[in-house]
Image (spheres, rainbow, N blue to C red):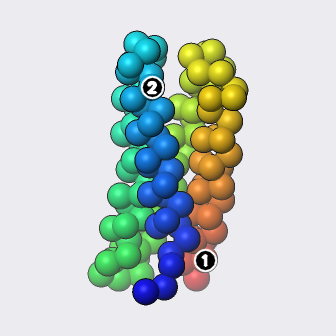
Amino acid sequence: MKQNIIVDKSFRFALKIIEIYQYLVNNKKGFVLSKQLLRSGTSIGANVKESINAISKADFRNKMSIALKEADETEYWIELLLRSNILCKNEIKFLLRDCKEICRILNSIVRNSSN
């Protein structure tokens, strides 16, 4: 079976999001923010996975667009956690880097699927 980079990256990213969520909950920091991060960060991969079995090109583009929106939202929550000092830069810089990379990939997919 052929490897799908965005499926793999979004799945691994969701696992990292779950780890950060558990860390935040266990340390009782930013509970509301951590729930938002968990929801949007795991939704990226779910929408990417749904797009694999899209019933049309428009459905595929729609699912990927939703994944991109969720990735953008996740980037927002990560930035908020970072700038509010709930998490330090060393704890979250890898997550922000990965999120930005996923956004770039999804943006390219959405743009190219519109043709």
* Picture quadrant where residue 93 is located: top right
* Pair 2/1: label in front: 2
Q: Is 80 rendered above or below residue 100?
A: above
Residue 2 appears in view: yes
Task: Judge from the rendering whether residue 88 lies leftward or rightward of residue 27; answer left or right.
Answer: right
Q: Secondary structure at mark 1?
A: helix
Query: Which quadrant, please, contains the C terminus?
Result: bottom right
Q: Quadrant of residue 79?
A: top right
Q: What crowding class fits label 2: few (fewer than 14 Cα within 10 Å), some (14-19), or many (20 or more)?
A: some
Q: Whole-percent x and y of residue 108? A: 63, 68
The residue type indicated by label 1 comes to Asn
- The Cα–Cα distance between marks 2 and 1, rounded to whole angstroms, is 37 Å
Label 2 residue SS = helix
- Can you give x and y, in whole percent of width and height, for residue 50 in the image? 33, 67
Report the disc number at residue 48: none
Q: Which residue type does callout 2 highlight? A: Tyr
Give neighbour class at mark 1: few <14, some 14-19, many 20+ (Cα, 10 Å): few
The image shows residue 102 at horizontal and vertical percentages of 59, 56
Which is more toward the observer, 53 or 63? 53
Quadrant of the image occupied by residue 106? bottom right
User: For mark 1, what is the residue?
Assistant: 112
* Image quarter in which the N terminus is found: bottom left
Query: Of all residues shown, which one is farthest toward the bottom?
Result: 1
The residue lying at 47 percent from left, 67 percent from top is 7
In the image, what residue occupies the spot 56% across and 16% down?
86
**Residue at the spot 33% in from the left edge and 77% down from the top edge:** 54
The dot on residue 23 is 2
**Mark found first going from the N terminus, 2 or 1:** 2
Q: Determine the residue positioned at 41% across, 39% down.
A: 18
Q: Nearer the viewer, residue 64 or 5?
A: 5
